[in-house]
Image (cartoon, grey):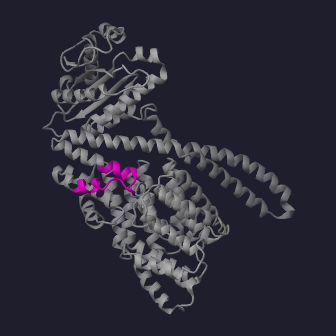
Amino acid sequence: MTKIVHFLRILAQLPAAAAILAALLCALVAGPASARCVGSTDPVIMRAELETGRDPDRAVDLIARQISATDPANKRRLAELYLAKWVALTMSGQPTAPALEKARGAASGFPSGDPANLMVRLADLHKLDNGPAKRSALSSIVRDYRALPDGSKAKACRGVDLSFHYALLEDHRNAFIYATQAYRNSPANERSLAHANAASMLAYLVSSGHDFPYARQLHSEALDTYLKTGMSDLASNELVLRGYTELDDGDTRAAMADFKAAADQARTYGNDYAVDYALLGVCQTAYEGGKIVDAGAECERVYASLARDGERMELPATALMADLLVERGDPARAVALLDPQIAKGKGEASHQDWILALQTRAKALSMLGRNAEAYADMRRASIVQTEQREEERQSGVNALQARFQTEELQNRLVNEERASNARLRLAIAVIVGAATTLALLGTLIFFLLRHRRRFRRLAMTDPLTGLGNRRATLEKMDHALRNVGASQPRASFVLLDIDHFKWWNDSFGHDAGDRILNDFARVVERSVRPTDIVGRWGGEEFLVVLPATGLEEARQIIERVRTEAAQEVFDFAPGYRLRFSAGIAMPSETGGLTDACIRLADRRLYAAKARGRNRTCIEGEEMPDDKAAQARTEPVAAAHSSPAKAA
């Protein structure tokens, strides 16, 4: 969630990426402002950038002294010094506008495509909403960026900035293109700040393609540069970014270790702002692990520091604090915190942060009995999740990433061949040929190993509906039921089966059947409570687990699902109404055995079908298997008739 912000701090050392990446990396990493570089070859500016990476607060004073000592006629150095100061102020969380205006004034006599003016123009993008105006401004900047000399530090730095801004627009395809160009534009010195920043940006984008091991490798490459050059602030920032990659990969232990290490690193040079960004990661990790109460002190500090106007992490800091309040039993205060944030609209917030805010408020509203409002928030969150999945599907990042890695391998082989001694050229050609074969085989093996976690995620997800499959649903159920208090009903298990699905599937085709299944999944997701679990059980059957819920309350929730489903309209069959039968059971009815409870819910489901369909059965029904089978295959009688009833 905060990955973009932390990358912002890294981009703060690269041209205009700092402010933008902070918002983008919010989805993946945590950190105040992203590292950016000015891209200057002036030793004075390079020293200023090095000090900024070590301690941005101290760098501000150093840069101010350099400005005072600079000849007013030296506009180039003054412009770059003010830009370096702007970066240092950004990374330390101080007001930046005066420094940026000074840089703009000093560079006013340069062409608009000059590297200094490009950095100023990129910095101005934060004034624009994510829309056509920003995209138009970016296109204009891209034209001037292409004219910069290949291999120059300025082009590498601006490339990271462009990648950052496109990432904020959630245009991961273009973001990957410019990050790749920046990474390759600094080959002469692979330990350079520009190269490290490009590696960090690439890591963020690669992780968005779910290649987490390779993302960790790139983060570690950047971290190694920052540590070897003594840039403690950037090292702290990179630990946060890597922590978010590990969190996305489901490795909460490694993530928590990196976030705490980042906070410790930031404390060594007294940067409280960087400490707060690291602690935001601690809070987020605790939230993801269902233990946010254990990180209460960290979440409270983060909220006090970052939940303020103009701070890019205001929304996630507030949403996490609200979730903490919900877990502490104070949903009213949680709603009070989130109402003004959500009223502002999504703006430049990442999809993840916006979904977190909506789902947290829905949970709080549900606890207050304001169910209609809770369902409205869940519906909005469901729409955003659908948009996010579609954007990821269309981004093309995975294909670009594969091509990038293949070309990197080829480039290394070419460089090795050019460095060969002429007397050994023939022998080296043979060795390179063998090495190429082995490298390609090794690449395939590493690719498969690298994607083990991704394959596991795919194995846990139903590809048609995006819901958890049977295995994933059972794992989520086990986790949820462990947190139910002894004074509450343990849970209700609900099996849903779409009525007459086979008939509609055979009549209108499998595409129509897929559409029905997918739409029904969305209806159920947005109609139940935030704490409930929905999964595809098989075929047209879905399992819903309602923790701490009795039979009658469960029946009421399922009837709300029924009302929502009946309102769905399908263009291939305007007269079709989406109806289903349901069976509900509780573990207390089966001696606490969940497997037996699900079987009882299954028998009640088919009792509901035998009684006429489009109804819910919550009691009795030790239905013989032969009658259950008959209920499953009974022909369509009146698909548009019979109101729902509770059996």
Which residue shows up at 52% across the image and 43% down it? 394
Q: Main secondary structure of the magenta part?
A: helix
Tell me: residue 245, above or below residue 115: above
If the image is split into quadrants, where does the C terminus sit?
Answer: top left
Residue 293 in sight: no
- Magenta-colored stretch includes residue 341: yes
Q: Position of residue 317 (x, y in %)?
A: 30, 59
Q: Position of residue 576 (x, y in %)?
A: 36, 20
Tell me: residue 285, above or below residue 537: below
24 vs 140, left or right, is: left
| Residue situated in front as seen by the camera: 127 or 66 | 127
Which residue shows up at 67% across the image and 69% down it? 149
58 vs 336, left or right, is: right
- Magenta-colored stretch includes residue 348: yes
| Residue situated in front as seen by the camera: 333 or 340 | 340
Which residue shows up at 38% across the image and 61% down it? 259
Total numbered labels placed on residues in the image = 0
| Residue situated in front as seen by the camera: 296 or 595 | 296
Q: Residue 158 is drawn in which quadrant?
A: bottom right
| Residue situated in front as seen by the camera: 623 or 467 | 467
If the image is split into quadrants, where does the N terminus sit?
Answer: bottom left
Tell me: residue 544, above or below residue 221: above
Q: Position of residue 301 (x, y in %)?
A: 26, 65
Residue at far left of view:
487
The magenta segment is: 337-357
Q: Position of residue 291 (x, y in %)?
A: 27, 50
Residue 356 in sight: yes
88 vs 382, left or right, is: right
